[in-house]
Amino acid sequence: MVKIPNKIKDLFYNPKTDSIKGLLKNISAIHSKIIKNTDFSKGTILSGDDDYTSIIQTSTIPEVGLSEAKLTELIANSFKGAPRWHSPLTMFNVAPPPLLETVASTTFTSLYNPNIVYDTASGEIAIVEQKVIKAIAEYIGWDWKKAGGSFVFGGKATTLNGVKLGLDKCSEKSATMGVKEDIIVLSTKVCHPSHPAIGSLLGIGSNNVIRLNVNSDTQVDVKEMEKVITDAVKKGKKIAAIVISGGTTNDMTVDPIKEVVELRDRLAAELGMSYKPHVHVDTVVGFPWIFFKDYDMKKNPLNIEEHAKDKINKIVKNLRDLNLADSFGADFHKMGFCPYISSVFIVKDKSPFYKGKDVNVKFGRYTPFEYTIENSRPASGHMSAYVALNLLGVKGFQFLIAHHTEIAVNLEESLEKTGQFEIINKDHWGSAVMFIPKISNNVVFKNLEEEKNIRDSYATVFIETMRKLGNPFYIDMVPEYSSGGVQYPYNSLKIYVMSPFSDKDTNKKFVSFILDLKKKIDSKFDFSYKNRPVVEYSHPLK
């Protein structure tokens, strides 16, 4: 009989003591190694210049497991180049510093390793999912006893679930027989780029996800929506879902939810539709702004600066009508300040989602696998959201969002005052600042191709130079036509304020840094064309 050596048993949680001393020791040892690779004046952990091939080619499976010291080094080295999300020097897209309590809860969900596919494999931690869904549904004004949902594998999955319910509604046999009818989904040109992919995944077809135009406020063109729906129904097509924005990533635009729902109801009656297209609001980024729905903007108890308060008010104005939608999604790993992944899909009428099954049952009968996409379901997401909601509360979220908005407004104004940068999303409502370095008026472009080549290269050099410097400030660059409501045709720079440690002093340091960087780049950059190749910079949104 094989006898497991004690040195292997010691690698596991000891059931005789349930002591976490070994775990804490490992965490401390790994963290001390990571800190040695950390320069606190940088936005990312220090990294080498090795390409991925040279890194990967040394990877092998050892015959005998590595020593604790070597393994600690191996783990720590894997974090080289990782963003320091908690640092105000890191302003890269909408990725948050997770609350320490959510990190602690995630550690324990990993340690106890529950699978919330059913409660017998997870205990009462499985019911935390329903607690979060109930609390959110009730808060926005739904009857929580009728509402339902589940935590899913990401923001994309929240919208996928909404569209799937709409597909089942307009084409009842599609779940068993496949999509046999001509079905479309409506979205907008500023909604998330994953929406066409959802059409592909559900068999509707990515080309059948119609991206509607937006108005000057970057909100959906409701008149075009009416025309598209009317024409589609008259041609015998069906509309599975109308997906509208509850806060776009770059501009935090919220579509007029009430107006869209009323249009849907009116057209369903006028056109004699046997169903109502499902209205899903993509609020994965903007959901936490709902915590301002009862905030007294006139009394302004938090003393939010006027410009920032106006932006928050614009978002909340339409987000208050979230209760009129059929479903929505929320990513707590964005503005919810939780670790990845913590995404929840919530629906007003739980019956079609749960397939008529009652989830409020006694222990041993709770079986989410019967309605979820996933069979393996970690508890980390819903535990993180549960902790964040209870730890911060409504007021805590208000403080964080107000602070981030104020800092973004200040940064935008500070950059503009230099005269060296142009803000290209001046009408944004959130905490993203998108800008471009100005080129001297003395530079004359011969044609559009030359202008694009130079402008794209110019913006890219800023990112590449900062990277070579070890990211003293870690910011993003967005490829052409991915800039949100204002579709800028060239690469642009993007800052996303996410750290609670960000302040106006940080902004001053950044503006001073970027001004100095621009001077150095301008002194060396070749603004003449001369068939100079574009500096390549890959971006997933392109």
Image: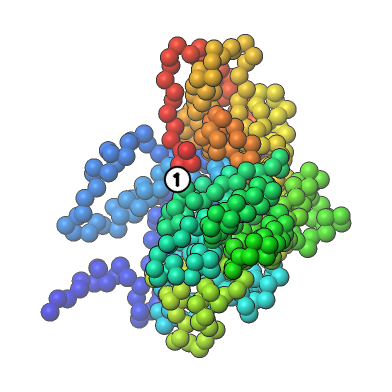
Identified at 27% across, 72% down, the residue is: 9
Task: Name the quarter where the N terminus is drawn.
Answer: bottom left
Question: Going by the image, does 282 lie left or right of 430?
Answer: left
Identified at 36% across, 48% down, the residue is: 78
Q: Is residue 533 or residue 207 the one in the foreground?
A: 207
Question: Going by the image, does 203 lie left or right of 455?
Answer: left
Q: Position of residue 436 (x, y in %)?
A: 60, 28
Q: Position of residue 141 (x, y in %)?
A: 71, 70
The residue indicated by pointer 1 is 82
Q: Position of residue 334 (x, y in %)?
A: 57, 54
Q: Is residue 445 or residue 406 the one in the foreground?
A: 445
Q: What SS does tag 1 mark? A: loop
Identified at 34% across, 76% down, the residue is: 14
Q: Is residue 298 or residue 209 the one in the foreground?
A: 209
Q: Is residue 15 visible?
A: yes
Q: Is residue 516 visible?
A: no
Count residues near mark 1 (Cα–Cα under 10 Å), then give few for <14, some for 14-19, many for 20+. few
Question: What amino acid type is highlighted by mark number 1?
Answer: Ala
Identified at 81% across, 52% down, the residue is: 303
Up-down relation of residue 235 to residue 458 (above or below): below
Up-down relation of residue 447 to residue 482 (above or below): above
The quadrant in which residue 490 appears is top right
- How many marks the image carries: the answer is 1
Up-down relation of residue 108 to residue 160 (above or below): below
User: What residue occupies the far left of the structure in this picture?
Assistant: 1
Question: Going by the image, does 159 lie left or right of 435?
Answer: left
